[in-house]
Amino acid sequence: MKRFDIITIFPEVVAPYAEASILGKAQKKDLLKIEAHNLRDYSTDSHKKVDDTPYGGGAGMVMTVQPFDAALADIKLKKKLLRAAPKTRVIMTAASGKRFTQSDAKRLAEYDQVIFLCGRYEGIDYRVEEALADEALSIGDYVLTGGELPALVMIDAIARNIPGVLGNDETILDESHGDDGMLEYPQYTKPPEYKIGKKVLKVPEILLSGNHKKIKEWRDKERKKA
């Protein structure tokens, strides 16, 4: 079973998405496990603080090293008797990180455990990225209020590369985003014509032709660069 662990101060935001649809079904089949951990549970502060004022001044608060260090020490899979050490990867979600791609999704699907460190406020003490995380990843050139959504986005993409998660129809994986960096072609379903306002929208004739060779040629032509 593949494990995905999310370290956050808002663990309650994870379950609604992780337990729905394909991810929820995969967990019920014991193909993967997604678990959120409350960072505050690992704070040694008497008030369970996980942040402090930034050195050098500035607005906002910065998340401290200690709780992340303690959480990782507890959550990381340990080597068991007669078993090789589990392959674990620690990802820090950060707007400044490397852009997450389909290649990363496939690469990370090879690990036994992927742990996501989710920041809030003004960010995380850089020493977490420097010494505790294996890499920092971003899902786009914009800033969110926290790292939980990026973590779930990446887990969703990674999970699709785990055998059995999509069922037997592996074409779902191949057509959505191929190894060649191309995205899926436009899709249509019934009815063949649909009117919106004064405009009649029609399904391309080639898709109604039954000529599978021509349909494949059309689909290859219509695919877009990622």
Image (tube, grey):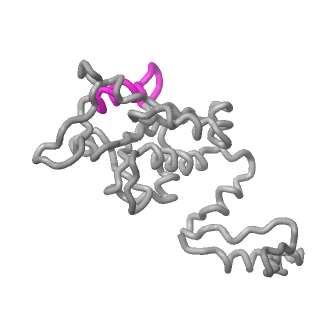
Return the residue nearer the eye: 213 or 59.
59
Can residue 162 be seen here? yes
103 sits to left or right of 164: left
Asked if 147 appears above or below 76 in the picture, the reply is: below
Q: Residue 40, image x and y in percent? A: 34, 26
- The residues colored magenta run 67-85
Which residue does the image show at 34% across and 48% down from the upper left?
135
Furthest-left residue in this view? 56
Which residue does the image show at 78% across and 68% down from the upper left?
188
209 sits to left or right of 141: right
Asked if 87 appears above or below 48 in the picture, the reply is: below
Which residue does the image show at 47% across and 25% down from the upper left?
83
Q: Residue 70, image x and y in percent? A: 30, 26
Q: Quadrant of residue 173?
A: bottom right
Q: Residue 171, image x and y in percent? A: 71, 58
Indicate yes or no whether the magenta region holds residue 38.
no
212 sits to left or right of 66: right
Q: Residue 210, image x and y in percent? A: 89, 74
Q: Quadrant of residue 21?
A: top right
Return the residue nearer the eye: 122 or 105.
122
Which residue does the image show at 34% across and 30% down from the upper left?
72
Return the residue nearer the eye: 9 or 26.
9
Q: Quadrant of the N terminus?
A: top right
Asked if 204 appears above or below 84 in the picture, the reply is: below
Return the residue nearer the eye: 211 or 156.
156
Can residue 214 be seen here? no
Asked if 31 appears above or below 110 in the picture, the reply is: above
Indicate yes or no whether the magenta region holds residue 82.
yes
Q: Quadrant of residue 75?
A: top left
